[in-house]
Image: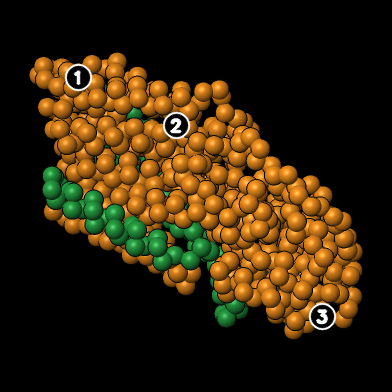
Amino acid sequence: METIIQAAYFIVAVIFIVGLKQMSSPVTARRGILWAGAAMVTATLVTFLNPQIIDDNQAATNVGLIILAIAIGGGYAWWSGKRVAMTDMPQMIAMYNGMGGGAAAAIAAVELLDATSKASNSSSTIADVMGADIAVLGILGAIIGTISFSGSIIAWAKLDGRLNRSRLLPGQHFINAIIAIVTIGFAVSIYFSAGNLAPIVIFFSLALVLGIFITIPVGGADMPVIISLFNALTGLAVGFEGYVLGNAAMIIAGIVVGSAGSLLTHLMAVAMNRSVANVFFAGVGTETGATGDGGEQGEMKEIQAQDAGILMAFASQVVIIPGYGMAVAQAQHKIWELTQLLDDKGVSIKFAIHPVAGRMPGHMNVLLAEAGVPYDMIYDMEDINADFQTTTVALVIGANDVVNPSAKSDTSSPLYGMPILDAIDSDNVIVIKRGRGAGFSGVENPLFFADNTKMLFGDGQKAASELIQAVKELS
Amino acid sequence: MIEGLAALYIFMLAGFTGYEIISRVPVILHTPLMSGSNFVHGIVLVGAMIALGIAATPTEQIIGFFAVLLGAGNAVGGYVVTERMLEMFKSSDKGSEG
């Protein structure tokens, strides 16, 4: 039986890796998640046959509890996952990730409690009872999992608009460092302890607080990096607890996610022109003097939807640059309708996506996909930037900082060095914007004052409807 | 059981595997892939089941219960949102009615 179970776990691990690999191409991605899902179900069912569970003297109670817990946790997650709006996806991922971290930490807690009672019975230390390697990785996984748990919950609350505070307490980093050091101190004392409960309780409490304190100062724009980092951390914690339990599937899946997640975190931070350390130690908006001095301003030139529609209908190529503002205004469906109309008129249309458009890399692609935009009309920044030279109209909707040319030219700008979409190279730029204010980062955008730029003020969805109307009237 | 040096090899190889998978992913799939990897570490459910399965005291049972509850939430929620996102990706070649 043991061999069959281990073989099943091995196959599950292989399918997870193949599934993740398939998710790296839009063509096979769907198949990848279906396979991985089947693997997860297999792993769960096989675990019920585990002799450690079946032969336990409380098997009946515990198996009942397992089924009940799966029903409640899985049922809630199914219900919430099915009804969450695509715009709210990032915080949902944060929440599910936090649950994973919490589960890993709870596994460690059960193992440590078990070892504690054994240690006090045999008057030896936890390290003796568990074995040095298992104790170290188990405790490490406990810290990481707990931080990921409480941190992800805070990230969820902030993205969901339930918690708006991103300010730094005086001496916040100092306090965090102290808590971190004390937490590690308790971790070491648990390792050498001879079956005391108190250090374990304090240890977990401190790690919870640490996760909260680390995440609270992080600014909204940096949240994707944090979520991705917690995702990687949860993976790591799962891998470590897998070692404690001697479960190969957990080790492999956990470490694969841990390393993939770390790389993804790094890629995101680079795309946003921030380092991961920078994200943690300076929240956007709490930095002093990060607003830039505006520089040379000028006059914004307004355009009416009617004229903008005509301009686009007779263009040879239109590039649409959507930002998170488009999603907030729920304008993506209107934009797709407009795209189809222009396409019928023979206009070549492309969508240009900045790596950090939306709340997470790729979030904008999901939002466009939801509206029905096929993925082969959507271009990454590197692939589209050269095309702006030959573009008649660049339509910017709900985006600001990602098309701000001062990121290239103005060394005093906080955006300086961030790669941008070169919308300014197009013959005409039309910017759909609510008002005249600065962008998310609070930095003025010279693009709005450029000679070839026209501003179309108004709500994204309403403006898009007016453009549709204008194009329709031409035929 | 996997122990000592063998585990170290597994850690290393799994680390490289994860790195390889991500380094070839187009940006358009980053969010679904983060969500997908979030689902994959839902395998923690298996460990949680074992932890609850071997729980001896009521305290351990309560904590183990939460472990399974949270693990199941991770696995099921991760699957549902990833599947929903990937379902929407389609090419314009094969019929693109929105």
The residue identified by callout 1 is: A193
The residue identified by callout 3 is: A314
Q: Residues within 10 Å of mark 3 (few under 14, many from 20)?
A: some
Residue A461 percent location from the top left of the image: 78, 58
Does dot 3 land on a helix, a strand or a loop?
Answer: loop
Q: Residues within 10 Å of mark 2 (few under 14, many from 20)?
A: many
What is the image's colouring? by chain
Residue A174 vs residue A273: left or right? Answer: left
Q: Which mark is residue B96?
A: none
The residue identified by callout 2 is: A211
Mark 3 on the same chain as mark 1: yes
Q: Chain of mark 2?
A: A
N-terminal label among 3 and 1: 1
- Report the Cα–Cα distance between label 2 and label 1: 25 Å
Residue A152 percent location from the top left of the image: 48, 38
Q: For the residue marked with disc 1, what is the amino acid? A: Ser
N-terminal label among 2 and 1: 1
